[in-house]
Image (spheres, rainbow, N blue to C red):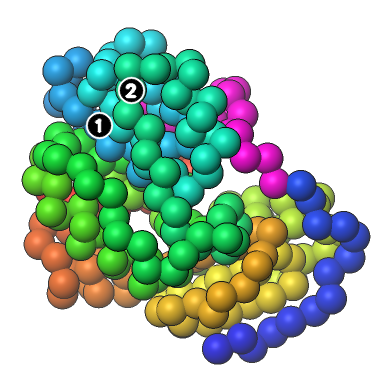
Amino acid sequence: MLVVSRTHVGLWPLIMSLHVRNMLSDKFHVFSQLFPEFTVHDTVLDFGGNRGNLLYFSNGVIQPLHYTSVDVDTDALDVGKTEFPTATWIHYNKFNWMYNHAGVHNPQFPDITKIDYIWSYSVFTHTDYNDLLKTIEWFYTLGFKKCAISVLDINNTEVITYFRNKRIEDYGSCIDVEPCGNNNIVYLGNNDQLFFNNTVLPTLNLQHLATFYNLTWLETQLKQQFKNVRIEYLTTSFSPFIILN
């Protein structure tokens, strides 16, 4: 249910389809911590992989022939395909509140054979809970060894401060998210809309969406539906990860 809305100040920022490459976007060290047993012979599904920053920053540890990026953004995939032509680039034309307003709501998942490791960073931080569950169900059909999915913690003040400052930078103001920690799911739409505890989010053409979870609640819910699930923080990571084995 939408419970709060305020008129935002300023123009909506232009969303860049290509993820930049800098120290902040280099997450391969996090990947290596989560998958220390990974070898150059293993296959990787980068779900929400954009133009392949994970592959790029791996410096050859991930082999292009063993790498698959699935993304809603065709422009990013085209760039990745040009840079790494032997990797696999798959367009998943699903509606996304930030990145693919023209997508469909219930597309079939891509036809992918067995994958060793699944990495999904900063994807389900911009979708609803239902999308997270449906995708995890599909992940389990791929026979992976291990899967890591980043999420946002509603009770992490550093995270809340970061997103508030980013929205103030982009829009000139931001509604206060910090008092919302007693909710299980909190969605921040643009800088001025808050949704609480929706498992399915309405179709909204937003410029920005940030999804925060109560981690205790989330882990409990996932354990009821899936086996071998835990949520953990890494000391070098901004976000906690859902770990599936």
Judged from this view, the residue extending furthest toward the right is: 10
For disc 1, the neighbor class at 10 Å (few under 14, some 14 to 19, many from 20) is many
Mark 1, residue position: 44
Give the camera-side residue of 8 and 235.
8
Query: What residue sits 62% from the left and 73% below the top?
Result: 204
Looking at the rendered image, the disc whose residue lies closer to the viewer, 2 or 1, is 2
What is the C-alpha distance between the residues marked 2 and 1?
10 Å
Of label 2 and label 1, which has the lower sequence position?
A: 1
The rendered magenta stretch, by its main secondary structure, is classed as loop
Residues 205 and 240: in front is 205
* Region in magenta: 15-33
Q: Nearer the viewer, residue 87 or 200?
A: 87
Q: Residues within 10 Å of mark 2 (few under 14, many from 20)?
A: some
Q: Quadrant of residue 85?
A: top left
Q: Residue at x 13, y 53 (%)?
A: 141
- The residue sitting at 33% across, 11% down in the picture is 60
> What is the three-letter code of the residue carrying label 2?
Ala
Amino acid found under the numbered disc labelled 1: Val
Residue 1 vertical placement versus 230 (above, below)? below
Q: Which mark is residue 150?
A: none
Residue ID at (23%, 72%): 220
Tell me where residue 117 appears, x and y as whole percent: 20, 36
Q: Please tell me the numbered disc located at residue 87.
A: 2
